Amino acid sequence: AQSVTQLGSHVSVSEGALVLLRCNYSSSVPPYLFWYVQYPNQGLQLLLKYTSAATLVKGINGFEAEFKKSETSFHLTKPSAHMSDAAEYFCAVSVPGGSQGNLIFGKGTKLSVKP
Amino acid sequence: DAGITQSPRHKVTETGTPVTLRCHQTENHRYMYWYRQDPGHGLRLIHYSYGVKDTDKGEVSDGYSVSRSKTEDFLLTLESATSSQTSVYFCAIRGRGTNAEAFFGQGTRLTVV
């Protein structure tokens, strides 16, 4: 069964600093991977997804993520943090050809941005 | 925004009472999901549906039942609410294919007292 691990339940950065949120997956086959963002009292919104095309995926709001098969990772980055990036971020995994019920989420990383 | 609506948005109920949460979509997506979100646990799948009258259990299905009599509606029922079911519940919809992204509703905050 696939799984996803997000390292660090809380990450704090200064405004303008690099954002790095870590996601590692476990899957018997190369998976599809997703990053979602959740602002307070809202549902989740898709930031970006990897579906076996380019390994570097660009998303909304200046975020990008790189699929690294050798490291089983799909870390989310943004060169310069804005105050508006403060939110909770979730990594999710789905297996090609598997059950559509198996969209599995990590436990989330809460990003704080200091002025 | 994807057309997905959850109701109610907030509910307080007493232990032992039945509760039904509703998810309504206007996107005609085949797949619908119920997740619960709790601090430290992320999102955990309760049940999902892959068509009218077709449902399957997720990892935390005990104490919950679901029904889907129409493509657009997916109901989550707590037959006898317990305090451990206090949570934020999210409905999601998804198109066909395991590479399809999910679209989420705004959530229902349920408190069982």
Image: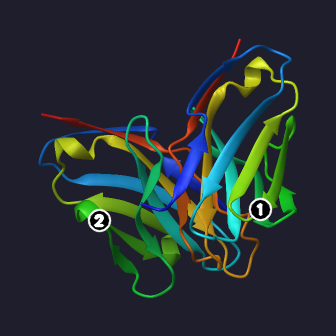
Q: Residue at x 16, y 49 (%)?
A: A17
Which chain's residue wears label 1?
A: B
Q: Quadrant of residue B52?
A: bottom right
Residue A60 got which mark? 2
Query: Between residues B27 and A45, which one lies in front from this camera angle?
Result: B27
Residue B70 got which mark? 1
**Which residue occupies the extreme bottom position in the image?**
A53
Q: Residue at x 80, y 57 (%)?
A: B68
Three-letter amino acid code of the residue under disc 1: Lys
Which chain's residue wears label 2?
A: A
Q: Nearer the viewer, mark 1 or mark 2?
A: 1
Q: Position of residue A89 (x, y in %)?
A: 42, 49
Three-letter amino acid code of the residue under disc 2: Ile
Q: Quadrant of residue B62?
A: top right
Q: Residue at x 15, y 55 (%)?
A: A80
Residue B23 left/right relative to A6? right
The crowding category of the residue bearing disc 2, from other C-alpha atoms within 10 Å (few below 14, some 14 to 19, many at least 20), is few
Colour setup of the view: rainbow
Relative to A36, residue A114 above or below: above
Q: Position of residue B94 (x, y in %)?
A: 61, 67
